[in-house]
């Protein structure tokens, strides 16, 4: 799919976005003044849990409003001034298929705007990969151990290369030949440590999960990334990024004790006064997860890494603007807990007759909660220019268990391992990744039936409707895994000489 189908620099009509935010704020206040009437509380423990969840959502909403309020364009950084710079290009690999790696290596050798030295960093020690590097005329680097996973692989290469700038591409992200021309100009400011560009999934037409994952990425790398950049808080996202070597050396390279080494590195650099820039132009085309197992694996690593970095954010010496941005990015991965709580509420009411709020009519609840909820979703849709879709929302909701389990692993200090996201999606049905979802969906359906038989009152119908909405969302999010898909043979993202890949 052509990258031009999504333009991360396109800014929605600003007055419309601000009007949506203002309306969202008003309806949030309308809902919370009703919610905070303690006389309506029924079960105090459930009421306290509901308040905690809604305050979390309010915090997430407020940081989102603040981030996108001053949305502005972040185009190409301008031309490099002076002699042509030298840039080391790092492509870390670990047992990925040759047909995935080859287009990225070939494209890296064609980058304009600098003297490039392409290095294939192979943690798998593959003879085929070494042969590919030789045929394409790039440097092959293999270390004896695998300490630190991707971070350790990059740090090893940093120790044996010497260009003043370093660009990093995941092996499935094929750079456009203009990548360096569009980014190197930012380094005219000697305090700029790195320039990040968007991650774009070129395979989003290949599966519903790839399409939904792409929409999630487009929300982040669109309005959210532009907003973070406007506040000097754009963090490194691991690929499609170019660094100043001096900045990396000052912090001793990538942290090797985090599953999200890019996030942890960004905190270190910003804390030391280095700056980051963002170019909101698609300059590389990559592959997103195509099946549920791959998606869950990716999200689990991100969630555990960012939640594990939360204490580091709290004790940092970052300016308050940057600290809030890192804080909001970290706690996003607690969202699954609120989804689980909202699904639990109607089950408890329909099966056991307990609920957080009582003595209020169905109409009163809908009057306050309905407009607030609708305004929240509408604000995200408007601010993102329509990039965020229902399928993206459903997939996120259906995998709420990832956030639940990730927090548990962080609390109990269960060190995760860096798992490479598979580059070819699996065909067939996948039940295990959505097992938690299926259990909750079944509980909701049972509760709906029991509630209707036991007490067909207006209050019951309200909770049945609420549970039904959750069932629909969970079903839409989980269906691609349950239905399976046909295995597709994907053409290379960029044309590569047939004899070069096959040799």
Image (cartoon, grey):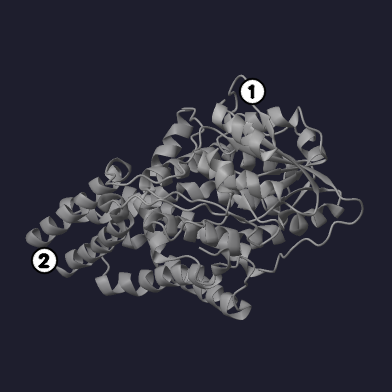
Q: Position of residue 38 (x, y in %)?
A: 37, 60
| Side (left or right) of 89 relative to 487 | right
Q: Secondary structure at mark 2?
A: loop
451 or 105, nearer to the observer: 105
Q: Position of residue 183 (x, y in %)?
A: 75, 56
Q: Give the residue furthest to the left.
A: 453
120 or 74, nearer to the observer: 120
| Side (left or right) of 269 relative to 451 | right
305 or 95, nearer to the observer: 95
Question: Is residue 285 visible in the rendered structure shown here?
Answer: yes
Residue at screen point 34% across, 51% down: 341
Can you identify the residue that label 2 sits on? 456
| Mark 1 neighbour class, 10 Å CA radius: few under 14, some 14 to 19, many 20 or more | some
Above/below status of 129 relative to 479: above
Pick whichever of labels 2 and 1 is earlier in the sequence.
1
| Side (left or right) of 21 relative to 115 | left
Q: Secondary structure at mark 1?
A: loop
Q: Give the residue furthest to the right.
A: 82
Question: Is residue 50 visible in the rendered structure shown here?
Answer: no
Tell me where residue 7 sits by quadrant.
bottom right
Above/below status of 244 relative to 28: above
Tell me where residue 314 sits by quadrant.
top right
Can you identify the residue that label 1 sits on? 143
* Residue mark closest to the camera, 2 vs 1: 1
Residue at screen point 71% across, 55% down: 179
| Mark 2 neighbour class, 10 Å CA radius: few under 14, some 14 to 19, many 20 or more | few
- Looking at the image, how many numbered discs can be counted on the residues? 2
Q: How far is disc 2 from disc 1 in space, using C-alphas?
A: 67 Å
Q: Position of residue 337 (x, y in %)?
A: 39, 47
Residue at screen point 69% across, 54% down: 321
The C terminus appears in which quarter of the rendering? top right
């Amino acid at each position: 799919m052509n990258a031009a189908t999504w333009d991360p620099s396109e800014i929605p009509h600003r007055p419309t976005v601000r009007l949506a935010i203002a309306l969202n704020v008003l309806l949030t206040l309308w809902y919370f003044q009703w919610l905070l009437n303690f006389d309506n509380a029924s079960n105090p423990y459930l009421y306290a849990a509901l308040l905690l969840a809604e305050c979390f959502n309010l915090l997430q909403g407020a940081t989102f409003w603040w981030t996108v309020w001053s949305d502005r364009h972040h185009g190409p950084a301008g031309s490099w001034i002076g002699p042509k710079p030298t840039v080391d290009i790092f492509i870390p690999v670990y047992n990925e298929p040759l047909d995935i790696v080859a287009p990225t290596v070939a494209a890296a050798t064609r980058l304009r705007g600098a003297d490039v030295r392409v290095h294939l960093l192979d943690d798998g020690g593959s003879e085929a990969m070494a042969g590919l590097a030789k045929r394409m005329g790039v440097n092959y680097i293999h270390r004896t151990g695998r300490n630190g996973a991707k971070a350790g692989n990059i740090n090893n290469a940093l120790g044996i290369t010497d260009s003043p700038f370093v660009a990093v591409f995941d092996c499935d992200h094929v750079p456009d030949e203009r990548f360096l021309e569009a980014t190197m100009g930012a380094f005219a400011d000697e305090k700029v440590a790195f320039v990040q560009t968007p991650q774009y999934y070129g395979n989003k037409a290949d599966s519903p999960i790839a399409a939904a994952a792409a929409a999630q990425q487009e929300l982040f790398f669109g309005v959210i990334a532009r907003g973070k950049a406007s506040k000097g808080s754009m963090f490194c996202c691991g690929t499609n990024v170019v660094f100043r070597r001096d900045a990396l050396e000052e912090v001793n390279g990538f942290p090797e004790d985090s599953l999200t080494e890019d996030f942890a590195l960004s905190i270190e650099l910003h804390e030391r006064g280095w700056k980051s820039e963002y170019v909101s132009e698609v300059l590389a085309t990559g592959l997103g997860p195509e099946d549920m197992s791959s998606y869950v694996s990716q999200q689990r690593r991100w969630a555990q890494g960012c939640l594990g970095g939360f204490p580091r954010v709290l004790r940092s010496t970052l300016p308050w603007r940057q600290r809030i941005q890192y804080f909001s990015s970290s706690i996003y991965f607690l969202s699954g807990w609120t989804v689980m709580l909202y699904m639990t509420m109607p089950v408890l009411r329909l099966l056991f007759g307990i609920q957080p709020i009582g003595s209020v009519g169905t109409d009163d609840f809908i009057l306050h909660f309905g407009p607030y909820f609708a305004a929240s979703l509408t604000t995200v849709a408007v601010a993102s220019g329509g990039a965020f879709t229902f399928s993206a929302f459903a997939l996120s909701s259906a995998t709420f268990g990832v956030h639940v389990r990730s927090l548990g692993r962080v609390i109990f200090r269960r060190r995760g391992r860096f798992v490479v996201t598979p580059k070819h999606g699996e065909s067939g049905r996948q039940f295990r990744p959505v097992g938690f979802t299926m259990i909750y969906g079944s509980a909701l359906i049972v509760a709906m039936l029991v509630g209707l038989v036991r007490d067909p009152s207006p209050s019951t119908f309200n909770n049945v409707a609420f549970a039904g909405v959750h069932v629909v969302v969970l079903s839409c999010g989980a269906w691609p895994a349950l239905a399976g898909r046909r295995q597709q043979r994907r053409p290379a993202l960029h044309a590569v000489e047939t004899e070069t890949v096959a040799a």
